[in-house]
Each structure stands twice: as structure tokens, then as C-alpha cells.
Amino acid sequence: MFRLAFILACVYLIWRFAWQLPVNQRIKAAVAVALIVFSQYHLLLQWAYGSMFSPEMPRWIVVLASGAFCWVVILLLFTLLLDALALLGHVANVKKGLRLTQTNRAWLLTLVSLSLTSYGVHQAIQVPAVKTVELVLPGLDKHYDGMRIVQLSDLHISRLFDRDWAAAVVDKTNALKPELILVSGDLIDGTVLNRTEDIAPLQALSAPLGVYASLGNHEYYFDAKDWVARFEQLGVRVLANESVVIGENRFNLAAVTDESAAQFAGAEPDVATAVGAINSALPILLLKHQPRDAALSAELGVGIQLSGHTHGGMILGVDYFLGLFNQGFMSGAYQVDEMTLYVSNGTALWPGFPIRLGVGAEITEITLRSSPEPQ
């Protein structure tokens, strides 16, 4: 379905963009061929590397190739927008003088799509800024009010987000001097063999109360068991449908597997099991990669759920549409009954679509509060 959609999109773009360019037929044909090739980027990765999630190419090629796919998407969005506006103008009988000529339309689409794609890809591959938030954890002892946690999510360490990028994220995280570091899934894209060097900087993550992670769907694409073992070697403890007590009875930290686990003979996410053996006198903070089914977490007594997976929607405006596939949860804090759900925009994103327009990546510095008012 994904590939068919882009084939149809390609036909539309050739008709409404390539053939409308004020250039000769050879250039129009070349643009048409480029649209076909760029739109099938993920299929080409599948053929070349056996997975569309791990482009094992030099970083600069990944930037250009994935950027070309992003250009097709941006071009498609703006072509649809202009055509929709033209249709509305026709229905409303707008004067011809207010309409774009074919030549102006073609140049406008070219300029806007290339400019936004270049800017968006550049923004996506930077080391993200720190975002500070305060979240109330009901039942937290007042003595621990103000405790600081750093949440990383969707690191997607790969040829695009490589060792140097990972090292910069680790340095920026450690500089915040958090008491606890939590990673809410999708740490990698690639096999343990291919990512050994790129993932190495995670060993330097440091917090007095430890570094913990939950699994995301991308870990399962590349043998989650192997990755759990590797993360543990790097000092990142993975919790899978289980919980631990943080510090000297500060709170329960629980984490679950990902919804994709069942496709790979893994255990499905089970919040009930994860919180089944907790210290009932302490509040619960849950790591769950995907924000869906947050109401169940709230029902089971979770005070805060930290999630990711959505990348914040990546493009302002499109994020609302993508939220429909995540039960309306896309970015930031949500109140779900008595529980706060926080959905990170992600520290990075999937290298198959690396673009951010109006939706920034984040290293999330969380201050825990025992009540809405600081103590």
C-alpha cells in the first residue's frame, strides 16, 4: 500500500509538475525519471540492503538520497495545496488576474519545495536543543520534589545519526547533570554488527540513579534480543514488562515492550505485568515507546507515562493528521484521567524521512513535582 501510494503520487506529480515546467521535453523527462527514482527510495534500500530502515551508505549519500525523498513529499504537499486552492478559486469564480500562470506556478513549486526541503533536512540532522518541562508525579515524596530526569527518545543511531552525532547528544545530556536518564525506545537503526561503532558513545551516559530504556519497534526490526544484550553491555538497563524501584524508594520505574514485538515472536507490551510487582506505596513512572492505549496505563495507576515514536509529526500541519494514527497523541503533555502522558518529539528520527519543519527535536529535561505547585 505504501509503495502503491507513492506510485500514484508520482503519476500525479509528473502530470501536475514535471510536464508543466517551462523547459524542453528532455528536461521534463529527466525530472519525471528523477521523481520516479526518488519516490521509490525505500524500495531501492530494500533491494540493496534487505531493509529500508538501515541505509548502509556514507552519511553524505544518506543525506542526499533521503533528502530527495523528502523533496518528493514536500513537492506533493504543495502541489496538492495549489491545486486545491485553484479548484476553490474556480468554484468561487475568482478573477483570472489572481490566478498563477503555468510558468509562475511551476517556478513557485520548484523554489518552495527545494527551499523547505533543504531547510527541513538540515534542521532534522542537527544535535537537538534541550526542552525543559515540569511534570507532576502524584504521590512523589515532597523530599524529592524538583528531581531532574532527562528523557531521550527515538535516537535512531545509524549512518545518518552516527557516532559523532551520538557523542554530541551524550555530552549535551551529561552536561545537564540529571539524576536519572531514561530512553523511551528506538535507540538504533541497523544490526549490532553495523552499529557497533556508532552506538559506543552511549556508554558514557552518566546519572547517579542509572540509565534505563524501553524497547521501540525499530529494535525488533534488528533482533531485539541482541540489542538488549548490547545495551546492557553499554550500561543501559532495558526493562521489558518489568519494573524497578528508583533510588531509596523514590518511585517505581516500569517499562514495557513494543506493540511490534508480537510480529517477531516477542512478548507484547503488558503494563499490568510491568506494574504487578511494584512497591504499592510508591508512585509509578512508565516508559512506553508508543503513546497509544495511555488510558489503560492510567487505569492501572501509572502517574506519568513517557513515550516517543511519533517524532512530533515532523511537519507542522501534517502532525495533526498523523495524530489520528496515534489516538490523537503526537507531541507534548496530555492529561489522561489522573495520569500525565508526555510524548517526546524525539531526539532524532527515522533516516528514511529526515525532515523537520516547525517541529523541533528535543533532549527533554524533566523536573518532577509532587504537586502542581513547586514545594
Image (cartoon, helix red, strand yellow):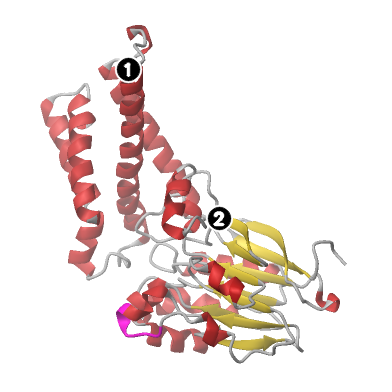
Is 201 situated above or below 77?
below
Q: Which mark is residue 155?
A: none
SS under mark 1? helix
Q: Which mark is residue 91?
A: 1
Within 10 Å of disc 1 (Cα), the crowding (few <14, some 14-19, many 20+) is: few
Q: Which residue is mark 2?
A: 331
The rendered magenta stretch, by its main secondary structure, is classed as: loop
Name the image quarter holding residue 117: top left
Q: CA distance from mark 1 to mark 2?
A: 36 Å
The residue closer to the viewer here, 252 or 225, is 252
Residue type, numbered disc 2: Ser
The verdict on residue 274 being magenta is no
Q: Is residue 182 left or right of residue 21?
A: right
Task: Give the residue type at disc 1.
Answer: Val
Of the 4 image quadrants, the one containing the C terminus is bottom right
Horizontal side of residue 292 vs 87, given as left or right = right
